[in-house]
Amino acid sequence: MKVTICIGSSCHLKGSRQVVEELQNLVEQRRLGDQVELAGAFCMGNCQNGVCVTVDGELMSVKPETVNEFFEKEIAGRLAQ
Ligand code: FES
């Protein structure tokens, strides 16, 4: 699974750095490093919905406050399927 986090300036202001760090921690804690590839990307052209994240190419919006929920549902949840 490939998860890409936008680190463009608008998403950066909305906390993309925090989202990246939190996702890295969660992936490590769950030992999912061999199944989840985290990457950064520049502006995805969807700034108003930042922080923009894609999961296998599917565009989603994550906030620092919702990163745990996002991880459970869209990352851990999908891998468990
Ligand atoms: S800065 Fe993230 S979509 Fe534009």
Image (cartoon, grey):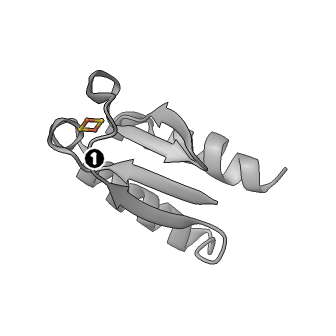
Residue drawn 45% across the image and 58% down it = 23
Q: Locate the N terminus by quadrant.
A: bottom right
Residue farthest toward the front in the current orientation of the protein = 45
The residue under the point 51% across, 35% down is 59
Numbered label tally? 1
Q: Position of residue 24 (x, y in %)?
A: 43, 65
Q: Is residue 77 above or below residue 32?
A: above
Whole-percent x and y of residue 10? 18, 35
Q: Quadrant of residue 22?
A: bottom left
Q: Nearer the viewer, residue 65 or 9?
A: 9
Q: Secondary structure at mark 1?
A: helix
Q: Is residue 35 above or below residue 45?
A: below
Ligand 1: give its quadrant: top left
Q: Give the left or right position of residue 46, taking residue 54 as reference.
A: left
The extreme right residue here reads 81
How packed mark 1 is, by other alpha carbons closer than 10 Å (few <14, some 14-19, many 20 or more), is many
User: Which residue is rendered at x = 63% and y = 71% of the image?
Assistant: 32
Left or right: residue 12 compared with residue 16 = left
Rendered position, 51 above or below 4: above
Residue 62 in which image quadrant: top left
Mark 1 lies on residue: 16
**Mark 1 within 8 Å of ligand 1, using the beta carbon:** yes
Residue 7 location in percent, x, y? 25, 50
**Amino acid at dot 1:** Ser
Using the image as rendered, state which of residue 39 and residue 14 is in the foreground: 39
Q: Seen in the image, is 41 located left or right of residue 14? A: right
Residue 79: x percent and y percent?
A: 75, 56
Residue at 28% in and 22% down = 48
